[in-house]
Image (spheres, helix red, strand yellow):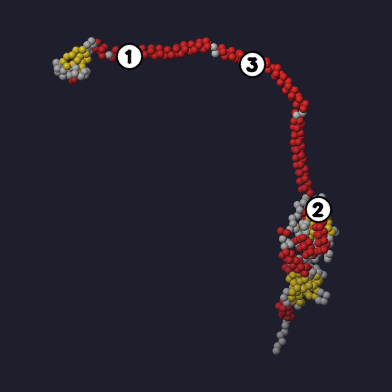
Amino acid sequence: MTTHIYSVSELCRETRLLLEGNFLTLTIEGELSNLSRPTSGHIYFTLKDDKAQVQCAMFRSQLRTAGFKPDNGMRVILKARVSLYEARGSFQLIAEHMEAAGEGALRQQYEALKQKLSLEGLFEQSNKKPLPALAKKIGLITSSSGAAVHDILTVLKKRFPALPVLIYPVAVQGENAKNDLVTAIELANNRKDCDVLILARGGGSLEDLWAFNEEIVARAIFLSSIPIMSAVGHEVDFTIADFVADYRAPTPSAAAETISPDQDQWLSHFNYLAAELTRLLTHQLSDKNQRLTQLHHRLKRSHPGAQMERQAQRLDDCQARFLQAPRRMLQHRKWQLSELTARLINNNPSQQIQQLQHQLTSYHHRLTRPIQNRLQQARIRFTDCNKGLETLSPLATLARGYSITKRDSDGTIINSIQQLKLNEKVNIQLVDGSVKTSIESLHETS
């Protein structure tokens, strides 16, 4: 039987495949040492405890998800694959995820509590109380020596220094912090000195902010009858208190800006209101003065002395009218007598008879004149007609030697020989009589 002889590279490759095939991704905790950062962006380090150590590598793409900058002496938890670096034949771990040790367990507790309280409805928007439009007093629950209280007071002094602030000093980190926070919230609700509470502290790690992730703190916030504003950590930090609070501010300074009015705007508004009030008061005073003047005049007119003066004047007027009444009456009677006299003269019968005679004469002339004119015209026409009749009269023709021949039997006028017969009797009319004869012969004019 021939023994297989391995080359070094073959052995290393087989060992790597064996390690990677038998170990799935594992989680390991240890302390960082010998950390190096080449220009490639990858990091290489040793993970050790008090008894052993192992070489590790973490590539740039996975390092970006760490959320912090690894450094020597830092205790971390790795999710890694077991492998072998064939070039050196060295056993190593390839890290896929890294987080600071201690935060992993806290992060699990955080997520579990967050899910629990969310299912209970502590995060529901419908349960959140509105912030006051203008706070009368702010309650500030924070460390009396931290940066948060300084930032909040600085912003409030700048924006609205007249707004009072009542500080409830508490520990914001450590074992007693959660109890201090609950006690301060309950004390503020019992005293009811404030109409809004700000729960604040500066930034820090998850472990530093852990007091604001405690369940008893979350429930105290939820049960508070006073609206609570959470201003814990930096803008990227989220705690359970942020989700339960009625309002979450990204920073303590932002909380102070949110809850306080801008004094410049308020002063401008006050100046406007003052001007408007002055205008209204001036207008009302003017109206009142005008009304007072009117009342003064009315009072003056209604004064007994003024009334007596008016009555005295009226008495004088009545007296003058009384004295003048007979004179006016006599004058009136004289005027009536003159008017009646004139009317009597105008209505005298002799004058009326004279006027009627004149009218009758006028009517007689007007009536006879057209009759005489028409008679004269009729005489002239009669004369003209008589002359015309005389000219056209048959008697005039007969007087000149002419005669009229008529058939004796029927009186027909004969004006042609054709109308006559022999022995026919005719009647001849002359100017002074007639002759009856018969036709003895007929001779027609050629």
Residue sitting nearer the eye, 379 or 223: 223
**Position of residue 393 measured from the top left corner of the image (x, y, whole percent):** 27, 14
Residue 311 disc label: none
Q: Residue at x 20, y 16 (%)?
A: 405
Image: 239 above or below 441: below
Dot 2 amino acid type: Lys
Identify the element where label 1 is drawn. Answer: helix
Quarter of the image for residue 310 reads: top right
Quarter of the image for residue 230 reads: bottom right
Residue under label 2 = 137
* Disc 1 to disc 2, C-alpha distance: 140 Å
Residue sitting nearer the eye, 283 or 425: 425
**Position of residue 73 measured from the top left corner of the image (x, y, whole percent):** 82, 70
Q: Give left or right: position of 342 versus 227.
A: left
Q: Does the CB distance between marks 3 and 1 fall below 8 Å?
A: no
Residue under label 3 = 332
Identify the element where label 3 is drawn. Answer: helix
Q: Residue at x 77, y 26 (%)?
A: 305
Of tags 2 and 3, the one toward the viewer is 3
Image: 426 above or below 115: above
